[in-house]
Amino acid sequence: MNSTLLKHAGPGVLSLEAYSPGMPIDELQRRLGVGNAIKLASNENPLGTSAKVREAIAQTVSGSDFARYPDGSGHRLKQKIAQMQAIEPSRITLGNGSNDIIELLGRVFLGPDRAAMFSAHAFAVYPIIAQAQSARAVVVPARPADDEQPYGHDLAAFARELKANPDVALIFIANPNNPTGTWLNAADLEAFLAQVPSDVIVALDEAYDEYMDPALRGDTRAWLDRFPNLIVFRTFSKAYGLAALRVGYSLSSPELADVLNRVRQPFNNNSLALLAAEVALEDQDFVQRSVELNTRERARLTEALQGMGLTVLPSQANFLAVGFGRDAKPIHQGLLERGVIVRPVASYELPQFIRVSIGTEAENDRFIAALKEVLAA
Ligand SMILES: *Cc1c(COP(=O)(O)O)cnc(C)c1O
């Protein structure tokens, strides 16, 4: 190896491990020769993409050329989001997936002399961004396994760690959290926000917000007016069924939106993605059907898995974390061999769990049947 080649690479980057995504169906076919597989590994929408969006894209593709740059300001999409969220367009930032928003936050607020804070067992992208910026990570211990929100975010511990670590510049909170599915009590979250110094940014990741019981949701829109250091971000990748097109957005104070805009790639959303998101926002029927399917099947799958004597973490998202009380790796492998792709979560320090996305009724039946086979083998 050339020892000088990477001499000037960021110190955090050199020890970084790349994000490992859920296995694509094609790859299972290539690697194990298993055909007819189903993927319940990346929390995608099992209903696919709304027919209205597919139609709009098809019409656009046949009727236009792609020689012109897209609208770098995402004007029309921002107008639609602004209307829906009752917020000024100047407080919206569009991202190439909400992953892009996380990255913009890292670039603005993290560096070698600052720290990012997030929970143990939280979304893998937070530690990656922190380390890529050579920032310190303050990992807050999660709630215990026998808590009502097992392995969930512990806001009291967040508050303690914040006092003990004055270099924290950015706090990530996922509600509900991936990969646990656990959620935060809205009043607790609001009380926590009120304790955070105004120069510490709180990034509230609501990727699964649509799937939450409305009675459990906080009034994040009102919090945004009270807390200028709060930034809330959402995605079109899950309930809106547009994961492949990469669109997410954040809501914040105009000051925060302004600094993110300064480091943003000028054309971070392509024209088809912008169009798809605009049409998807208008098709709330599709979102509602997706959420209803998820709520129904999440309950059914939970019951079936508990009936098999397995641990199922409470979830307000579109996936379940399932615990086996032993190393889950052979179970993951056994499912792969039967054409069912789920997500191992050992890298989230949950080696005895897998994460399974809620699929269609038929997909969930197939998952349960395959899992019964694997456990009996
Ligand atoms: C899926 C997910 C996202 C969204 O990712 P995109 O980049 O918008 O596709 C963000 N946060 C969490 C916790 C997620 O699970």
Image (spheres, rainbow, N blue to C red):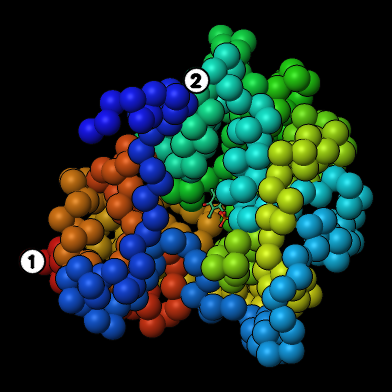
**In the rendered view, does 337 fall on the left or right side of 25?**
left
Q: Quadrant of the N terminus?
A: top left
**Amino acid type of disc 1?**
Ala
Question: Is any part of residue 48 visible from this angle?
Answer: yes
Is residue 288 depicted above or below 75 in this figure? below
Q: Quadrant of the C terminus?
A: bottom left
Going from the N terminus, do you reach mark 1 or mark 2 first? 2
Marks 1/2 in contact by CB < 8 Å: the verdict is no
* Most distant residue in the left direction: 377
Is residue 25 depicted above or below 132 in this figure? below
Tag 2 residue: 136
Q: Residue 214 location in percent, x, y? A: 70, 57
Q: Please report the residue visible at 87 percent of the width from the left and 39 percent of the height from the top.
A: 254
- Which of the numbered marks, if any, corresponds to residue 377? 1
Q: Quadrant location of residue 77?
A: bottom right
**In the rendered view, does 164 fall on the left or right side of 179?**
right
Question: Is any part of residue 187 visible from this angle?
Answer: no
